[in-house]
Amino acid sequence: MAKNNVELSICVVSWNCCAKLRECLQSIFLHSQGLIIEVIVVDNASSDNTIQMVMDEYPQVRLIRNKTNIGFGRGNNIAIEKCRGKYILLLNPDIVIKKACFKELISSIETLPEAGVVGCRLVNKDGSIQKSFYKSFPSIMSELYWGLMLHRIKNIMPRYKGDKNQAIKVSWLVGGCMLLRKGVLSQMNGFNIKYFMYGEDVDLCYRLKKINLKAYYLPNITMLHYHGVSSKKQKRHYFSAVMQRESVYKFMLINYGRFTAFLYRCVWIVCGSVRVALCGIGCIAAHLLFKDKSKEVVRCFEKYMRVLSWGLGFEKWTKRQGI
């Protein structure tokens, strides 16, 4: 196939999610009629049946097998280098395409002013809408706001109140579904490899902003997102909570400087302490009143103990990629 014939390259980085990847690939090929696509799957050393499944059921997929889990950003960068299409769609393996929308995604990035990346609405299996975009980049105040759970009292964050069928200009998009031009991704050198997982999406959108390109959220295009399938395979139930803080810390260190990054760590020492105290009270109450719920509260307590431990610098395992 000639290089110029490929209209869209779709990149999927997978780790131990064979069943969901099968569903993802099935939906891609089902809804790509009338468009010349290529699909590249980068497998990060899965120990399940992922490799065999792709080889047996989807021989048209270009499969790249890594010997170790090199993370989300590095895995995507390998795929991006191999892409032949003008446009690149970065998809999580736990995404399911519900209807033909690839042409609409491409049309959007072509017609929206100064669009550098577009993403769509992501929903849970029950149809509820996930938070898949943010109107501002992480800051000390926003992290304090969420860390102290002030949003439970009153949501003071700005909300979009316009036409729900129109594209929304946002600060950054969650990386489950991101469409970009290959030329732009090459200019950006792909994802920043200093992130192992989480944070690559906000960092990429921040760097796009610095070259005057915009991020747009498309609420009229919907995809099903099972969310966190690979993270749940981790033995540590607190893995996601701690790694997310580590990634935001790296984002602030890289883009805002050491002092702001230090303040961010201090914020989570304070917020972690508050949440540990609340979970501790909850553990006692749950044990006394709702014994069947006590295990859930204990897990929450352990999770925020680990977040607090990370704030104090004790979770050394997070240093997958040094700066």
Image: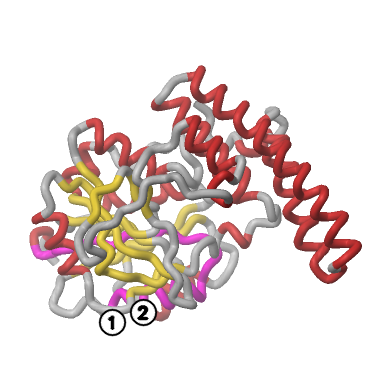
Q: Which mark is residue 30?
A: 1
**What residue is at 42 percent from the left and 69 percent from the top?**
123
Real-space Cα separation, disc 2 to disc 1, in angstroms: 6 Å
From the image, tell me which residue sits under label 2: 26
Quadrant, the N terminus:
bottom left
For residue 74, side relative to residue 281 (left or right): left
Badge 2 element: helix
Amino acid marked by disc 1? Leu
For residue 183, side relative to residue 45 (left or right): left
The x and y percentages for residue 70 are: 49, 46
**Residues at marks 2 and 1 touching, judged by CB atoms closer than 8 Å:** yes
Badge 1 element: helix
For residue 250, side relative to residue 102 (left or right): right
* Other-residue count near label 1 (Cα within 10 Å), few / some / many at <14 / 14–19 / ≥20: few
The one nearer the camera, 65 or 157, is: 157
Amino acid marked by disc 2? Gln
Q: Residue furthest top?
A: 259
The x and y percentages for residue 111 are: 9, 56
Q: Is residue 320 above or below residue 30?
A: above
**What residue is at 30 percent from the left and 62 percent from the top?**
120
Label count reads: 2
Residue range in magenta is 5-29
**What residue is at 39 percent from the left and 56 percent from the top?**
132
